[in-house]
Amino acid sequence: QVQLVESGGGLVQAGGSLRLSCAVSGSMLSIYRMGWYRQAPGQQRELIATITDYGATYYADSLKDRFTISRDNGKNTVYLQIDTLKPEDTAVYYCAAQIFPTYTYPYWGQGTQVTVSS
């Protein structure tokens, strides 16, 4: 079992920045990759970025300019830095864990709300 707890969301003005955190605990040796997703009201969940256990990153093309994923293995935490926030970034942001050997994403956090005012 893996437990994921997101934090760092909130209300921010357009143009501002936020750093979201995802604290990871449990069977971490089973984790291959961590991902950040978001879901806006009435829309499908959207992949933002992923990072492997050895630090390789992937970003969705439309989001790579303002989003940065990173991890601190010593703190068992994955981060998502969001710069130049826009109102359309308003969503619930989730972290998820991809595990060996199935390479599925069975573990998700509860989400953290990001609201960007114009």
Image (spheres, helix red, strand yellow):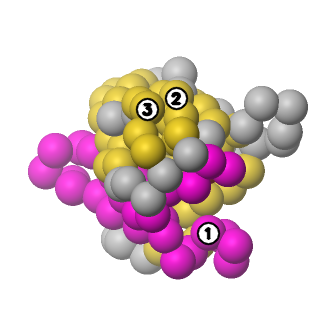
Instruction: Write down the region rendered in magenta.
Output: 60-88
Q: Mark 3 points at which residue?
A: 11
Q: Residue at x 48, y 29 (%)?
A: 112
Amino acid type, label 3: Leu
Q: Give the CA distance from mark 2 to mark 1.
A: 18 Å
In depth, the one of 87 and 7 nearer the eye is 87
Residue placed furthest toward the front: 118
x then y, percent, for residue 19: 33, 49
Q: Residue at x 84, y 39 (%)?
A: 43
In depth, the one of 108 and 117 nearer the eye is 117
x then y, percent, for residue 107: 57, 32
Q: Give the CA distance from mark 3 to mark 2.
A: 8 Å
Query: Would residue 33 appear left or right of 17 to someone viewing this image?
Result: right
Does residue 33 appear in this view?
Answer: no
Report if residue 85 lies within the magenta region. yes
Instruction: Give me the disc on residue 63.
Output: 1
Alpha-carbon neighbours of circle 1 within 10 Å: few (<14), some, or many (≥20)? few
Element under label 1? loop
Q: In this view, does 118 lie above or below 92?
A: below
x then y, percent, for residue 106: 64, 34
In depth, the one of 79 and 99 nearer the eye is 79
